[in-house]
Amino acid sequence: MDFQTQIDQAGFPADVRVSTYEEVEGRIFRIMRRVPEGKQGLEILLSDDAVEMYGEGPMVVTVLKQLLERAEQGLPMVEAGQEYPRQTFVAD
């Protein structure tokens, strides 16, 4: 299943954008929402070791569930020029 289909099926609110990109340590999943005060969002780093240990499919589903929960609870503000707050999933 392609990533966009997974996002669509996860049930994210219409006003959030979920994206992903590769980084040296693994894959970054970012959720972002624009609000009148600026921008809200966060990132989750899914380490290559976690994918190797638990499998890519189950870990992507886990990350998307975490992002959805955070979107429903409220995302932190991202100040201009600052990085997104980041959570990391690594292998045990």
Image (tube, helix red, strand yellow):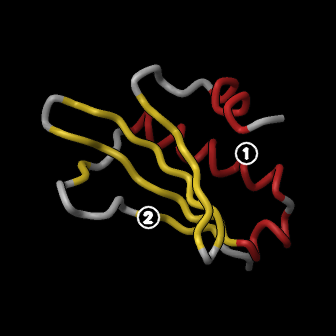
Q: Quadrant of residue 81?
A: bottom left
Q: Amino acid at mark 2?
A: Arg
> 73 or 30: which is nearer to us?
30
- Residue at the location (47% across, 56% down)? 43
> Label 2, on which residue?
86
Report helix, strand or loop for mark 1: helix
- Residue at the location (52% across, 39% down)? 18
Q: Quadrant of residue 12?
A: top right
Report helix, strand or loop for mark 2: strand
Distance of label 1 from label 2 (alpha carbons): 18 Å
Number of the label disc, if any, that sits on residue 42? none
- Crowding at dot 1, Cα within 10 Å, few <14 / some 14-19 / many 20+, comes out as some
Number of the label disc, if any, that sits on residue 61? 1
**Seen in the image, is 48 located left or right of residue 56?**
left
Residue 65: % across, % down:
63, 42
- Residue at the location (53% across, 59% down)? 44
**Seen in the image, is 3 located left or right of residue 81?**
right
**Seen in the image, is 59 located left or right of residue 25?**
right
Residue 69: % across, % down:
51, 40
Instruction: State which tag comes first along the sequence, 1 or 2.
Output: 1
On screen, residue 77 above or below 3: below
Residue contact at pointers 1 and 2, CB within 8 angstroms: no
Q: Amino acid at mark 1?
A: Val
